[in-house]
Amino acid sequence: MSEMVNVALDAMGGDNAPGEIIAGAVDAVGKRDNITVHLVGDHDAIQNELKKYSYPEGRIKQVDSTEVIETGEPPVMAIRTKKDSSIVVGLNLVRAKECDAFISAGSSGAVLVGGQLIVGRIRGVERPPLAPVIPTKKGVSLLVDCGANVDARPSHMLQFAKMGSIYMEYVMGVKNPKVSILNIGAEEEKGNALVKETYPMLKTCPDINFGGSIEARDIAEGEADVIVCEAFAGNVALKMYEGVGNVLLSEMKGAMMATPFTKLGALLIKKSLKETLKRFDATEYGGAPLLGLNGLVVKTHGNAKRKEVSNSIIQCISFKEEKINDRIKEKLDI
């Protein structure tokens, strides 16, 4: 039998907490028999939701907390003053090795700050990056960094590439993943000072399969498995990617429902279209890990619903089984 993976889940974080968060936990333990979820949050709120479901006894546990960090609160101050918040309590479970991972749809700033202050960085990791998996024409790609380090240095970017390659290969199953740096052109001499200084470091690094620069328009084509960038550019690219996808989906649905003829056409392609759209549904791939910490911390979308929460929990299995942190230490010569 596989080793049990213990996941601390912020039951109070996000737009749809606690209902959708707890529903996702129930789904996850129903799909996999080697997961135990520790729901962190208000006792009564969690109990009221759990009463709606049946689930394997002992596989969902409750850890009480009395405070919630709101999205608009200054992250550092909130982490330091709200010691009994669901985020701080959950992160402390990982720090104490009582849980293998912590997942939250709550305040991004608090999760990022708390991950570094409470769980702590692996010795030698300069800056932990936030690395979401995004759907592409050829499968999925890892965008690293998308929100944690807006003023990265070349040495940070090199570590992003190494850690991203490890995650993509051992968690997502992509052998010898191709790494590219996000740029404004394919030519080596293009880019800002950060890109120009980082490029030769990636090019000569023996630990990665470097494929040169990638322009934003080629991300969706799946031209790279790991896309390296600093967080400002990465976050802009990610939000644009998600926004255009949502608009196109909405417009396509409207066009198919416009007339009786288009409705008939939609019915004829329904099965094929559903399969295609599923591949481009970001919620299928779980949340974004904060790589390089002493334990796994995963940030999901603020509006995450049960499917994204469930998939985020399940993705923690591979992280533990493949000993990702040990591989990071080895790759970074730590």
Image: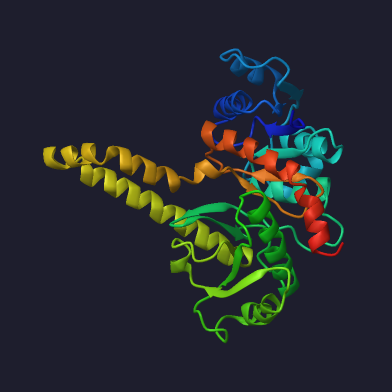
| Depth check, front residue: 259 or 267 | 267
Q: Residue at x 32, y 46 (%)?
A: 250
- For this view, does 87 lie left or right of residue 253? right
Q: Going 57% across and 52% down the picture, which residue do you hit? A: 133
Work out whether 257 lies above or below 156.
above
Determine if residue 74 is in view.
no
Q: Is residue 194 above or below residue 142?
A: below
Residue 258, image x and y in percent?
Answer: 17, 42
| Left or right side of 175 for 3 | right
Tell me the quarter of the image containing the C terminus. bottom right
Asked where in the image residue 69 lies, by quadrant, the reply is top right
Residue 256 found in image quarter: top left
Q: Position of residue 145 (x, y in %)?
A: 64, 61
Residue under the point 60% across and 13% down = 54
Residue 229 in sight from this viewpoint: yes
Would you say 58 lies left or right of 246 here? Answer: right
Q: How many marks on residues?
A: 0
Which quarter of the rendered picture does the N terminus lie within? top right
> Going by the picture, which residue comes out furthest to the bottom?
189
Residue at (48%, 68%) from the top-left corner? 216
From this view, report whether residue 8 is shown above or below residue 250.
Answer: above
> Residue 263 placed where, x, y %?
18, 38
Residue 121 percent location from the top left of the image: 82, 54
Which quarter of the picture shows residue 191? bottom right
Q: How is the image coloured?
A: rainbow
